[in-house]
Amino acid sequence: MEVAATISEGDMVLEESVVEEEEEDMQEQEAMMWQLLEEMVRECAGEAVEEGVQELAGELLDELLDEESGEVVEEFNKELLDSALSSSESSDLEECESPAQEVVEEEFDGVLTEDILAKGLSNLRHSATGLEQTYIHLSIPNCKLCDISILYNYMHLQKLELPYNKITDLRCVNCMPYLLQLDASHNALSSLADVKLPQSIKEVDFSHNQIFDMSHLSDYRFLFKLNLDNNEIQTIEGLRNCKSLSYLSLAENKLSKVCGLDNLPIKFLCLQGNKITDLRGLAKLKRLHKLDLSNNKIESLKGLADHDLLEIINLQNNQVRELNEIKHMQNLELLRVLNLQWNPIQENPDYLYWILYMVQKLTELDLKKVKAIDKVLAINKYNPPAEVVAANDHMTHIMYSFQQLQRIYDSTLPNFDIPYPMLVLVGPQASGKRELAHMLCQEFSNYFGYCICHTSRSPYYGEEDGCDYHFVTEQTFEEMIRLGKFIETIKYNGHYFGLSRDALEAVAREGLACCTHMELEGVQSLKKTYFEPRYILLIPMRKEKHRKRLLLRGLYDQSQIDFAVSRVDTYISMNQDHPGYFDAVINSDLSKNIPSDINQSSRRKISPSSGLMDSSTRNYSSRIQARLSAEKTVLEQYSLEQRQKVAREAVKGKAPGPYNYLFRRVRNFPNISSTSGVVSKITSFTSLVPVLSSTGYEESSDSLSRLMSSEATEEHFQESSLSSAEELSEIIKPIDLDTDSSMEVVSQALLSDYKLLGIPGFKRIMEDDQSSLHTLEEARPERLKEENIPSKYSSVRNTPSPSQRLGSNIKPILPPIPSGRTRAEIPDSPQQAVCTLK
Ligand SMILES: Nc1ncnc2c1ncn2[C@@H]1O[C@H](COP(=O)(O)OP(=O)(O)OP(=O)(O)O)[C@@H](O)[C@H]1O
C-alpha cells in the first residue's frame, strides 16, 4: 500500500513535473513569439522612419500589433514609436550639423581634404567655359577648417561658402575666376590685402572676422552686396569703383563718421553699432531706400535731406535731442518707417505731433503704427487748414463772450430775421480793400460807417489810431480776446487783427451799415457767426503788378511780399472752388503809376504823387477827404446837384429812399447759371432798381417795374446769365484803385451809375420810410398794379428773411437797415441796452 501509495505519489510528482515542463515550453514559445514579433515591428518601423514616413510607421505598428497584443502591445507600440522618432530626430540633427562631422570628431587637424570637400560639393553643371562638367557650388560650414589650400585646384567654383571655420588665409580664391558668391563669415581673417577676388564677384560676406582695413575691396565693378559686419574697420574706404554696390553692411565696427560712399548706388545701408555722430557723408547717396543707423551717437540729422527714395530709417538708441533736427527729414517723400526710440528727443512733449507733421507720410513710428487721428491732430496743431483756424477762432470768441454779461446789441435790433447790413471787402494784402472801404464810407456816409478793426502791429507812417486801426499791444489784444470782445480775429505776419464787437456796435449805433476789410481767414470765421455780410473780393489778377505794388509801399520785407503774393492763388482758388462764396469780385490790378523797374533803394523814396501806396500817403481818410473836396468839374457839379435834388425828393416823400434801391434784394432767377471767377466784362445790367432820374418818380418807377417784371428779367437773363455775385461785380466795375482817375471810376461806378450820391440824412430817411412807402405804393401807376407787377416798396417792406446763409445765389445784395432802427430808439450808452439774461 505504502509502495502503491509511493508510486501513485511518484506518478503525481511525475505528472506535476510534466505539467511544469509543458508550461515552461509554452512560456519559451511565447517569449520567442514576442521576440519575433518585436523584431518584425522594429524592422518595419525602422524602415518607415528611415523613409521619413513617421505617420506610416505609426500606422504600421498599429496594424501589426493592435489586434493581436491588446493593451500591452499598444504600450509597446507607443514606446517603440517614440524611441524611433527621437532617434530619427537626433539623426536629422546630426545630418544638419555637418556632412563632415564624423571626420571632425576624429581629432580633425583643420586641413581640408578631398573627402571633406567631396561632401560639400554640389550643383553639377557645365563649367563657365562650357567644356566640362563640374561642381560649381562648395559649402563646408562649421568644420574648424584652417587650411583650405586644396581649393587652389577648384577654379570652376562659382559659389563658395566657408562660414564658421578658422580660416586666416583666403588666397585660394585668387584662382577662382568664375566666383560670384563668397561667404567667408565667422572666420579669422584679419587682412584682405592678399585676397584678389575676381572682377565678376557679386556677393561677398566677410562678417564676423577681424578685418580692420577694407581698402582692398575697390575695383569690383559688379559687386552688388558686401557684408563687413562685426569687424574692426575704422574708416569706410576703397569702394569708389564699386559702381553696382546696392547693399552695404558695416554694423558693429569702429566707424566714427560716414565717408567714402559718395555717388554709390547703395540702396540698403547698415551702419548700426558704430560711433557715428553725424550723417553729412550720406548727402550724396541719392538712391538710399533703407538706412539702419541704430546704436550710434548721432546728434544731428543733417545729411538726411534730399533722399527722395528713402523709405525706412532706423535711428534707435542715438543722441538726437532737438525737434528741429526732424526738419532734415521733412522732404523725404517716401519715408514710411522711422524709429527714434531711445533718443532724448522722445522726451519732448511735442515730439509725436511734430514728427507726424514734418513727415506726413509715416505709417510706422518707433515700431508702432501711426494712427490717422494723430496725423490730423498734428496738422491741426502746426498748420491748421483755414477752416480749422476759423472754427477755433469762432469757438474761442463764442466761449469768451458767453462768460460776459449778455446784452441786446444794436446790430441785432429789431429782430434776427433781418440781418444787420455789413459789407466786407476781402482780398490779399495791398489789394486796395482798405482804401475802397474808406472811400465807400466817405461817399456813402449816410449808409456806411467804417468799422475800425484792432491790431497789435505798430502803425505805419501816416496811419492814425482810431482811424485806420485801433492800435493796441499784443497783451491788450490777448486780454481783449479773453474778455470776449472780438467777433473774429486772425494772426497775419505775426500780428493780431480783429473785428471787435464794440467797433461794430459803434457803427450800428449810428444807424449805419458796417463796412470793413479783412483777409480770407477773417471771412471764414465771420461766416460762422450770425452776421450775414456781403463779401466783395478784390483780387489782383497780375501777380507781378501786385508784387510791385507791395514793393512800392516800402513796408514789407521779401518774405512778407512773397507770402502776400502767394496768397493771391488762395483767393483765386477759393473763388473758383466755392461759387457764390464772394458776392462780387473786383480786379484790383494797377494800371498806371507804377514804374516798371523798381530797385531796392528807390522803394522808400517814392514821392506821394508817384503812386498811392507810398507809406507817406497812407492816411486814407484825409487823402480821400482831400480828393472829394477837390474842385469839381461842371459835369460833376451837375451830377451832384441832380443827386441832391433826388435826395431832397426822397426825404420829402416824393421819391423812395435811395438806400431802398441800393440794397434791394435780388430776385432768385432760376435760369441763372452759377459761375465763378473774376468778371471783367461790363454789361449794362444791374440787379438794382434802376436810376431815379430827374424826370420824376413815375418814369423811374415804370422803368423799375419793367426791369423787375419777370418778362424783362428773363429776357435780360437770357442775354446775361450771371450769378448774384457776378451781378454785383458787374455793378462795381473792375476798378483801378490807385490812380487818380480810378477814384473817379469808383465814384462813378457807385455814384453816377446809380445816382445815389447826396443821400440825405439816414435817420430822416428812416423816420420817413414807413410813410413814404405808403405814399409811393399808392402812387404806383394803375397799370402796374393791374399787371400785378411787384412793387419795389412792398418788397422792401416785406423783405423775406434770408432763407439761406452766405454763399447762396438767392441772397440779397445787402439787406436794408431794419426800419425799426432809428436814432431815437437807440440808447445813448451801451449800458442802457444792457439787459442781463436769465
Ligand atoms: N479784423 C480783421 N480780420 C481779418 N483780417 C484783417 C482784419 N483787419 C485787417 N485785416 C487784414 O490783415 C491784413 C494785414 O493788415 P495790414 O493793415 O498790416 O495790411 P496792409 O499792409 O496795410 O495792407 P492793406 O492795404 O491790404 O490793408 C490786411 O489784408 C488786412 O485787410
Image: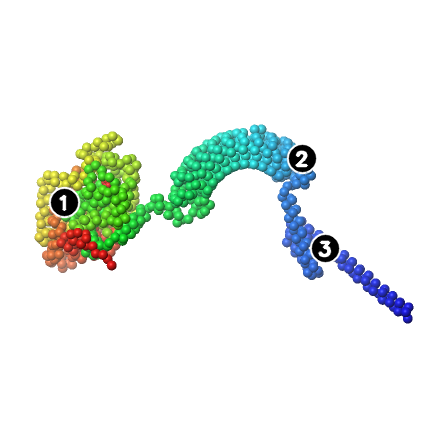
Establish if 507 lies above or below 154: below
Q: Please report whichever mark, 2 or 1, sits nearer to the chain's N-terminal start.
A: 2
Rendering quadrant holding ligand 1: top left
Task: State if disc 3 and disc 2 touch (CB < 8 Å).
Answer: no
Residue 38 bears which disc, if any? 3
Q: Nearer the viewer, residue 5 or 133?
A: 5
Q: Nearer the viewer, residue 81 or 478?
A: 478
Q: Nearer the viewer, mark 2 or mark 3?
A: 2
Mark 2 Cβ inside 8 Å of ligand 1:
no
Horizontal side of 736 relative to 268 (left or right) equals left
What secondary structure is marked by label 2?
Answer: loop
| Residue at image point 24% right, 47% down | 499
| Residue at image point 49% right, 39% down | 295
Residue 508: x, y in percent? 18, 50
What secondary structure is marked by label 3?
Answer: helix
Residue position marked by numbered label 1 in the rendering? 752
Q: Please report whichever mark, 2 or 3, sits nearer to the chain's N-terminal start.
A: 3
Horizontal side of 442 relative to 41 (left or right) equals left
Residue position marked by numbered label 2 in the rendering? 109
Residue 549: x, y in percent? 24, 36
Residue 318: x, y in percent? 46, 39
Looking at this view, name the residue that lies furthest to the bottom. 1
Few, some or many residues within 10 Å of mark 1 (<14, 14–19, 20+):
some
CA gap between label 3 and label 1 equals 123 Å
| Residue at image point 17% right, 47% down | 448
CA gap between label 2 and label 1 equals 114 Å
CA gap between label 2 and label 3 equals 44 Å
At label 2, the amino acid type is Asp
At label 1, the amino acid type is Ser
Q: Is residue 251 visible?
A: yes
Establish if 359 lies above or below 61: above
